[in-house]
Image: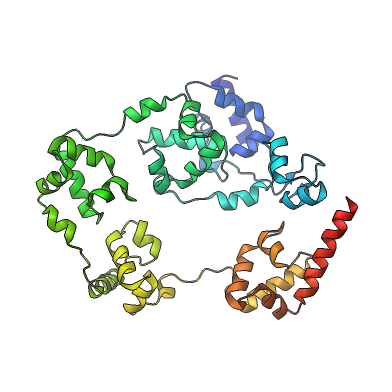
Amino acid sequence: MTKPEIIKTIRSLHRQGKPLNISAVKRRHPELMKAVYAIKPYWGWKRAPEAAGVKYSDIKLELQDYCECEICHAQKERLNVHIKFKHGVEMEDYRIDYPEADVICEEIRARFSKMKCKDLPHWEPLWTAEYALDRLWDRRDKGLPINSKAFQFRDPGLLRHIRPLFGSLDNAFRSLGLNPDDIRRNRISLKNKEEVLNGITKRLRLNLPLNPRAVLTGMDSNCALNRGAIRFFGSWSKAIEAAGLDYDAFLRKSRYPSPEKVIHEIRRRHEKKLSLITREVRRGNNRDHALYDKTLEFFGSWKKALSAAKIRYKDIAPCRLKYPTKESVITEIRRRKKAGLSISSSDVHLGMHTNTALYNSGLRFFKKWATAVKSAGFSYRAIGSNRRRGMNQELNRR
């Protein structure tokens, strides 16, 4: 298929209200997906609907709520238990025999596929090899960092999926038709002293650390800035001094030299209505690494520092539990039992009808899952016996 034919097909599918997310198209129209990724230079699925005049945010999504066993064609949300006890096959062997088969349905996988990204929002609900390539290409198009270190802090989901899908980041680049060596040679570089000084000033303004280790290997590292400092000033220390800073005093002096200074800054942030949630202090727009580090040094934890500042952590990070009370946990356990679902700890936590939120709330309010089940009016010992009896019957049928 040529580009015009692909565009025509996508428009037709969109008018018919057909799902156009990657996993749905691979399932319903595999030849269309193959045609898109066969086009050179790289085009990708994200740009295909856009070329057809369809906004990606407007496409219909479809996620299957089951996956099919390749041995007996049974349809279940999860196949792990089914494959092991129904067919006596270990998962490692099943994956070798059917490398492209899913063992967890798309709906469940989508819940755990969403990982926060600092500089590029997600547009697909599910990670696939095609989405990983599209995302890598989009980062390159937008001039965003495309090295493994940047992915580790800014787009962890991409790095996490590229390695098992392609083996390495270099292989993913080759799949895009790019030469990894060319990408490494074209690293961002600063052109003159002014750009280096502006970079140092910007880090200072954003409260980012300016010690050499942080600039080279920290969470907000900037190797290009370090290379520019050495190239135009001879060393990082000379660049710092050229920016009007006392390098020696800067390294020795902390902005928060005492617990009182830490408490004062926490209260100041609270008065300014800046977020005091841990992840925001460490990685948010108003992050302050020095404050967080000194908090751990003086108080041992962020919550203890807030307590010392007379600020309750639950006031700044309100509880968002799905089951926020003992009564809600008991009600859900009874509902599961009435619906014929298992309420044993292993099934609720890891089984086919898992409910991790319920399990965690059960431990939170009752300390033990067995206590939560007993509070709901059921005998946990009887539940365990019934489960073992069912497993033995399953094995005997085999």
Q: Position of residue 301 (x, y in %)?
A: 38, 70
Closest to the observer, 158 or 135: 158
Locate the N terminus by quadrant: top right
Left or right placement of residue 382 versus residue 282 in this view: right
The part of the image, by quadrant, that contains residue 278 is bottom left
User: In the shown orientation, is residue 364 left or right of residue 76?
Assistant: left
Residue 176 at x, y percent in the picture:
48, 27
* Quadrant hosting residue 239: top left
- Residue 213 seen by the camera: yes
Q: Nearer the viewer, residue 205 or 344?
A: 344
Instruction: Examine the image and state in which quarter residue 229 appears.
Output: top left
Going 71% across and 75% down the picture, which residue do you hit? 373
The residue lying furthest to the right in this view is: 397
327 horizontally vs 161: left or right = right
Q: Is residue 289 above or below residue 241?
A: below
Where residue 133 appears, as percent x and y from the top left, is: 50, 34
Q: How many marks?
A: 0
Instruction: Kindly identify the residue that appears in the image at 43 percent across and 35 percent down.
Output: 138
Single out the residue that lies furthest toward the top. Answer: 2
| Vertical order, 371 against 336 (above or below) | below
In the rendered image, residue 342, in percent from the top left (x then y), is placed at: 76, 65
Viewer-side residue, 215 vs 177: 215
At horizontal 56% and vertical 36% (from top left) the residue drawn is 165
Q: How is the image coloured?
A: rainbow
Judging depth in this view, the residue of 75 and 45 nearest the camera is 75
* Relative height, residue 275 to residue 307 (above, below): above
Residue 98 seen anywhere in this rendered image of the structure:
no
Q: What residue is drawn where x is 38% and y is 43%?
A: 150
